[in-house]
């Protein structure tokens, strides 16, 4: 693909993108081309004679990735002077960058781009880059606009923004790769710098577009029970202990190798984690690879069967010839993405550092085999982060694979195309935070941050990028116990936010600053402090009471109990209080119109609303 740049002293200075087939005249003296030994882009200014001749020689001296059958140019919109231009090819088109809404990137062995304009009844033809150059084209586009990416199951979509203030903001360049979705949500919700806070109905529409399937109720509904006060009570003190030793682990084994007193064992692991010598065996139980009630002989038989199954799947992709792979774009794309991610996963860890490291080979092979195990999902960016600690602990290809399969059973919805797991968790987290600290939640809401999308990366890969490698091992094994409640990882998020809320509010952080601050917490968090606080928050919520205008004391709202897996006793016989409604069988949690309401709706007539 040849990309040309030229400018004209036009007063409006509007940037347009113009496509024309190669047969349309192209001035080689105005070309941009990629340097042979550099990823940078060199601009060739217009100059006569010798410089033009040198350019042609340079281009012919090696194969530039942009050598293609058409040309795309960026140029200043020329001033209208009333002169007619030459007849253009029927395939040519042009548009202003300010009219560009998004670019969808798809792969079919080569990249092709599909442009979507903000207001246009006609669709533009796709631009195909059979010999590369799409990346350089987008790099050129970034000179004039801010591009943020959303990576989905089958394609990448780039959203185009022209806000210069956002483009220069340091937060944009500090967020990691998983913040691309956060960037997109941030730009879409906040809008341009000239706008004030978007009206609630517009926020609802935008977030619904960003996260398909998310329903946001903007209408007041009759039948709400108004909660006037939530008494959280004093946050209790909790005690943690040291990690479970190998000797203590052995005490929980009977002569045939069955685990004894499993509930107590999980409690001990929750309270202190495991010493590293125990992890290789204990993680297989915690992740469900080994049944807790299995004997040693049963586990050996299981491993033999799982080893055969693993290598049968591995052989499937290993035996695909190059000729076959050329006709299998999905497998080819999975392999390409896995190779890229493996080469940048935990390379500072000794287990994965260096060139031709065997750990990297195993990481690659396990992920490729997982594509055979679950071809519909295949490989999605971030899965290498979930596998890396497991392989590090197992030091065995087969065991690591099946433990990873078990972990992915829990995390599967996070990586599906519709990302239903992420939608649900973000809503649940906001529900919990609102109960814990209404003032802080209202502050975030006032900064368009009530949806907590800055926690996206935390939830997507379970804090893998936020903690040191050893702290990740400790956190994961604690969470895998399932104690002290379900979705304990959401309370871990609440604990981190609780520690940061004073700084965020006292410094009056806005949307940009909140995102930047949260991102910069990476590798600065104290895991033991977080686990202390998260457990204390769990106990605090479990014992809190809710007072209302109609009922003296209520149980926790059903949304909270449902998220954390708490159950509530029925009303005492003979009580003079109004009867409590039956627990709803279905709930739809929704955010309100900016006044801080969180609603529960159900098939029953009773609903609950918190008020500021």
Image: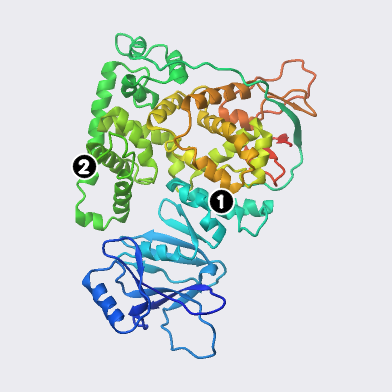
Q: How is the image coloured?
A: rainbow
Against 108, is 464 above or below?
A: above
User: Do the residues bearing badges 1 and 2 touch, measured as CB atoms within 8 Å?
Assistant: no
Q: Which residue is mark 1?
A: 186
Against 309, is 509 above or below?
A: below
**Which residue is depicted at the point 30% across and 84% down?**
49
The quadrant in which the N terminus is found is bottom left
Q: Is residue 177 left or right of residue 449?
A: left
**Label 2 neighbour load within 10 Å: few <14, some 14-19, many 20+:** few
Q: Secondary structure at mark 1?
A: helix
Q: Which residue is mark 2?
A: 356
Residue 591 at what x, y percent from top left? Answer: 65, 43
Rendering quarter of residue 108 = bottom left
Label 1 and label 2: CA atoms lie apart by 40 Å
Residue 235 at what x, y percent from top left? Answer: 63, 21
Residue 454 at what x, y percent from top left? Answer: 54, 43
Q: Label for residue 383? A: none
> In the image shown, does 294 or 447 lie closer to the viewer?
447
Q: Secondary structure at mark 2?
A: loop
Q: Is residue 602 visible?
A: no
Q: Is residue 58 visible?
A: yes
> In the image shown, does 557 or 298 lie closer to the viewer?
557
Against 133, is 517 above or below?
A: above
Q: Is residue 370 left or right of residue 567?
A: left
**Label 1 neighbour load within 10 Å: few <14, some 14-19, many 20+:** some
**Which residue is depicted at the point 66% across and 58% down?**
195
The quadrant in which the C terminus is found is top right
> In the image shown, does 291 or 527 lie closer to the viewer?
527
Nearer-N-terminus badge (1/2): 1
**Which residue is depicted at the point 80% across and 19% down?**
576
């Amino acid at each position: 693909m040849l990309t040309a740049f030229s400018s004209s002293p036009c007063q409006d200075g509007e940037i347009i993108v113009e496509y024309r087939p190669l047969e349309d005249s192209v001035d080689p003296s105005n070309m941009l081309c990629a340097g042979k030994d550099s990823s940078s882009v060199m601009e060739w200014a217009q100059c006569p004679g010798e410089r033009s001749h040198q350019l042609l020689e340079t281009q012919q001296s090696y194969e530039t990735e942009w050598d293609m059958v058409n040309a795309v140019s960026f140029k200043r919109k020329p001033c209208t002077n009333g002169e007619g231009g030459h007849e253009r090819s029927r395939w040519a088109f042009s548009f202003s960058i300010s009219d560009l809404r998004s670019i969808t990137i798809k792969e079919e062995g080569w990249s092709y781009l599909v442009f979507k304009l903000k207001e246009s009844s006609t669709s533009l033809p796709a631009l195909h880059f059979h010999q590369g150059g799409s990346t350089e084209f987008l790099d050129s586009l970034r000179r004039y606009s801010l591009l943020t990416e959303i990576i989905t199951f089958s394609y990448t979509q780039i959203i185009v923004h022209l806000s210069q203030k956002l483009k220069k903001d340091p937060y944009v360049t500090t967020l990691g790769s998983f913040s691309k979705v956060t960037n997109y949500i941030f730009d879409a919700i906040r809008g341009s710098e000239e706008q004030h806070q978007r009206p609630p109905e517009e926020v609802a529409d935008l977030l619904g577009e960003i996260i398909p399937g998310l329903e946001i109720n903007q209408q007041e509904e009759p039948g709400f029970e108004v909660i006037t006060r939530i008494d959280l009570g004093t946050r209790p003190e909790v005690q943690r202990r040291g990690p479970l030793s190998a000797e203590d682990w052995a005490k929980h084994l009977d002569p045939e190798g069955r685990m004894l007193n499993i509930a107590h064992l999980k409690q001990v692991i929750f309270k202190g984690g495991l010493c590293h010598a125990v992890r290789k065996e204990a993680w297989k139980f915690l992740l469900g690879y080994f049944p807790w009630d299995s004997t040693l002989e049963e586990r050996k038989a299981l491993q033999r069967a799982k080893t055969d199954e693993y290598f049968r799947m591995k052989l499937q992709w290993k035996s695909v010839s190059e000729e076959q792979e050329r006709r299998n774009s999905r497998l080819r794309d999975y392999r390409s993405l896995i190779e890229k991610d493996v080469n940048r996963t935990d390379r500072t860890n000794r287990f994965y550092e260096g060139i031709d490291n065997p750990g990297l080979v195993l990481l690659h092979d396990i992920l490729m085999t997982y594509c055979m195990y679950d071809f519909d999902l295949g490989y999605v960016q971030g899965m290498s982060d979930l596998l890396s600690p497991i392989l590090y602990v197992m030091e065995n290809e087969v065991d690591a694979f099946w433990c990873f399969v078990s972990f992915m059973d829990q995390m599967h919805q996070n990586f599906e195309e519709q990302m239903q797991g992420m939608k649900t968790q973000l809503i649940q987290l906001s529900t919990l935070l609102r109960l814990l600290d209404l003032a802080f939640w209202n502050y975030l809401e006032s900064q368009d941050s009530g949806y907590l999308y800055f926690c996206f990366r935390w939830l997507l890969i379970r804090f893998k990028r936020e903690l040191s490698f050893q702290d990740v091992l400790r956190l994961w094994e604690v969470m895998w116990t399932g104690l002290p409640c379900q979705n304990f990882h959401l309370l871990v998020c609440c604990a981190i936010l609780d520690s940061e809320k004073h700084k965020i509010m006292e410094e009056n952080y806005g949307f940009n600053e909140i995102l930047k601050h949260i991102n910069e917490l990476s590798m600065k968090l104290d895991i033991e402090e977080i686990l202390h606080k998260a457990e204390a928050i769990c106990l605090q919520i479990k014992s809190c009471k809710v007072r209302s205008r109609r009922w003296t004391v209520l149980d926790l709202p059903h949304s909270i109990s449902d998220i954390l897996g708490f159950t509530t006793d029925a009303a005492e016989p003979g009580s003079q209080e109004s009867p409590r409604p039956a627990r709803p069988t279905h709930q739809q949690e929704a955010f309100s119109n900016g006044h801080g309401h969180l609603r529960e709706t159900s098939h029953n007539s009773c609903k609950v609303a918190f008020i500021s």
